Image (cartoon, rainbow, N blue to C red):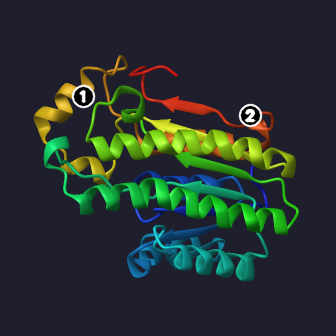
Amino acid sequence: MKLLNKVAFVTGAGQGMGQAIVRGFIAEGAKVVAVDLNQAALAESLADLGDKVLALACNVGDGASVADAMGQAEQHFGGLDILVNNAGVGALDSFLETPDESWERVIGVNLGGTFLCCREGAKLMVKGGRKGAIINLSSTAALTGDGPSHYCASKAGVMGLTRSIARELAASGIRVNTLVPGPTNTPMMSGIPDDYMQALLKNVPLGRMCETDEIARVAVFLASEDASFMTGQNIAVNGGMAFI
């Protein structure tokens, strides 16, 4: 098992890629703190995993909420080895019609939430003397610009944040990498108009959407000792849609 006895903290764990990553980590021997806005729905969706998972409510865009969830993770499992920043939101605003509140929400959750969780998670790793791994989820839209401006900007910001903190945290033995998915079969994608989705898939050389378990397997790799000399990298899982 690649992650035996490791403690992981996964945001946006209620569905889609987050839930697949939780299950992938547990299959490899980890214990997981799974967080989402809706704790009741989250706990129900992961009930079959028993005491290997701790389901918590957390608003990643709120520093106090993040600090509280990290504190509960430390109290329950004794520390932290792996952090996955998967929680994210999108919107279909055109640039000229983007309301201030939509910009602030998308940037605040996707980029601000990643920053807050990285800061608090890294503090916990350093406190425990653990050589941890942080995985931040970006998007191929950050490379292509094919998407709403606030979403593309937030996900490009995640890449820059990753590079910066990878350098700063290296002295503590903490690796930080970005996982960059392409179009993936998740509930978030179900709200995208069919004509837009078909046009999007025409740009994927492998000709299909990614499945969540394919993202989870790459997350396991980045969290494990298999990636022990990798930090500050952007790892694209997009079927050839764009290259880094």
- Residue 220 in view in this figure: yes
Which of the pair 71/2 is nearer the observer?
A: 71
The x and y percentages for residue 154 are 41, 47
Which of the pair 210/179 is nearer the observer?
A: 179
Kindly indicate the quadrant of the structure image that contains residue 206. top left
Residue under label 2, please give it: 230
Which of the pair 18/29 is nearer the observer?
A: 18
The x and y percentages for residue 238 are 43, 29
Residue at (88, 62) in percent of width and height: 129
Q: CA distance from mark 1 to mark 2?
A: 30 Å
- Residue 138 in view in this figure: no
The x and y percentages for residue 178 are 58, 40
Per the image, label 1 sits on a secondary structure element best described as helix
Per the image, label 2 sits on a secondary structure element best described as loop
Left/right of residue 94 with respect to residue 65 in the rendered view: left
- Please determine whether, in this image, residue 206 is positioned above or below residue 141: above
The x and y percentages for residue 18 are 48, 56
Q: Earlier in the sequence, mark 1 or mark 2?
A: 1
Residue under label 1, please give it: 200
Kindly indicate the quadrant of the structure image that contains residue 166. top right
Three-letter amino acid code at the position of disc 1: Leu
Dot 2: few (<14), some (14–19), or many (≥20) neighbours within 10 Å? some
Kindly indicate the quadrant of the structure image that contains residue 126. bottom right
